[in-house]
Image: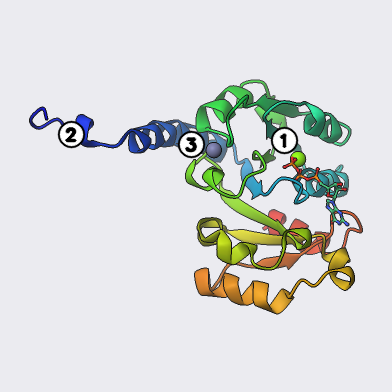
């Protein structure tokens, strides 16, 4: 092994993350300088990230100036859904990538009129695992779980729960129809992250959206 070769000893994944973090820091500095509050929304495929953003954008109309970046492997469908509620939407095609990276956000920010934005939502690729490790430069990480995934998912995805500034529990309208144990879900969360707020929401009925919007307005 070459002597003193620090770079040769750093595992590849660490170097990838280091490079990502440098770009994330540039994103963060720019967003902060402009006073744009930014949220990285992380949740499993089908948990309702886009649905939640659709109802959020509808509720924010005329009250905030949002923009949305949305990551997806292969389609523009989420971007098209969101564009009905927001005129600044950028769809990021990740190809085979199962998470967003800071340089993709950097490029996408260049396609937005940031002077006209005070709130940035980033819908990450549907995945509870690696998006947690890639800083995008966001102000807050929001973890979205939903009832249809089962009440054990917080315990099975500890890194998201630990890293989250807020957890949303979506599809709460389905509680009467599923055997989801709400208190067991919360107990698992509390073991990992004693203080993170948990908001029960339904993107479909609008239940709990007020509390989410109040949190965004903080
Ligand atoms: N009953 C109910 N259904 C919901 C709710 N939120 C989302 N859904 C449904 O769940 C399905 C998936 O919602 P999406 O918003 O596409 O989920 P997503 O997390 O954006 O999915 P990906 O982008 O593919 O990862 C859709 O059929 C929604 O209508 C909710 O609060 N209640
Ligand atoms: Mg989506
Ligand atoms: Zn990934």
Classify residue 15 as left or right of residue 49: left
Image quarter in which the C terminus is found: bottom right
**SS label for mark 1:** strand
* First-in-chain label (2 vs 1): 2
192 in relation to 55, above or below: below
Q: Residue at x 66, y 77 (%)?
A: 184
Q: Nearer the viewer, residue 202 or 137?
A: 202
Q: Residue at x 33, y 33 (%)?
A: 12
**SS label for mark 2:** helix
Q: How is the image coloured?
A: rainbow
Q: Is residue 87 visible?
A: no
Badge 1 is on which residue?
68
Question: Marks 1/3: CA distance?
Answer: 18 Å
Q: Residue at x 63, y 24 (%)?
A: 95
Q: Assign ligand 2 to one image quadrant.
A: top right
Question: Marks 3/2: CA distance?
Answer: 29 Å
Q: Is residue 106 visible?
A: yes
The reply to whether the residue tagged 1 has its Cβ within 8 angstroms of ligand 2 is no
Q: Position of residue 119 (x, y in %)?
A: 69, 42
Dot 3: few (<14), some (14–19), or many (≥20) neighbours within 10 Å? some
Question: Marks 2/1: CA distance?
Answer: 39 Å
Badge 2 is on which residue?
6
Q: Nearer the viewer, residue 152 or 111?
A: 152
**SS label for mark 3:** helix
Can you tell which of label 3 and label 2 is closer to the viewer? Answer: 2
Badge 3 is on which residue?
29
36 in relation to 113, above or below: below
């Amino acid at each position: 092994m070459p002597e003193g070769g620090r770079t040769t000893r750093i595992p590849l994944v660490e170097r990838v993350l280091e490079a990502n973090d440098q770009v994330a820091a540039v994103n963060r500095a720019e967003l902060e300088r402009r006073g744009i509050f930014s949220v990285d929304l992380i949740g499993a495929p089908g948990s309702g990230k886009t649905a939640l953003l659709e109802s959020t954008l509808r509720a924010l109309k005329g009250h905030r100036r949002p923009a949305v970046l949305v990551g997806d492997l292969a389609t523009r469908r989420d971007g098209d859904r969101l564009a009905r509620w927001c005129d600044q939407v950028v769809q990021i095609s990740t190809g085979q990538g199962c998470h967003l990276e800071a340089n993709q956000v950097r490029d996408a920010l260049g396609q937005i009129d940031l002077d006209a934005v005070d709130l940035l939502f980033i819908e990450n690729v549907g995945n509870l695992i690696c998006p947690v490790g890639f800083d995008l430069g966001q102000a807050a990480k929001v973890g979205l779980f939903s009832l249809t995934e089962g009440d054990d998912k917080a315990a099975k995805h500890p890194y998201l729960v630990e890293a989250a500034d807020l957890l949303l529990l979506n599809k709460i309208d389905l509680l009467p129809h599923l055997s989801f144990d709400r208190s067991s879900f919360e107990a698992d969360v509390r073991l990992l992250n004693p203080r993170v707020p948990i908001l029960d929401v339904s993107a479909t009925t609008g239940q709990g959206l007020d509390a989410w919007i109040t949190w965004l307005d903080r």
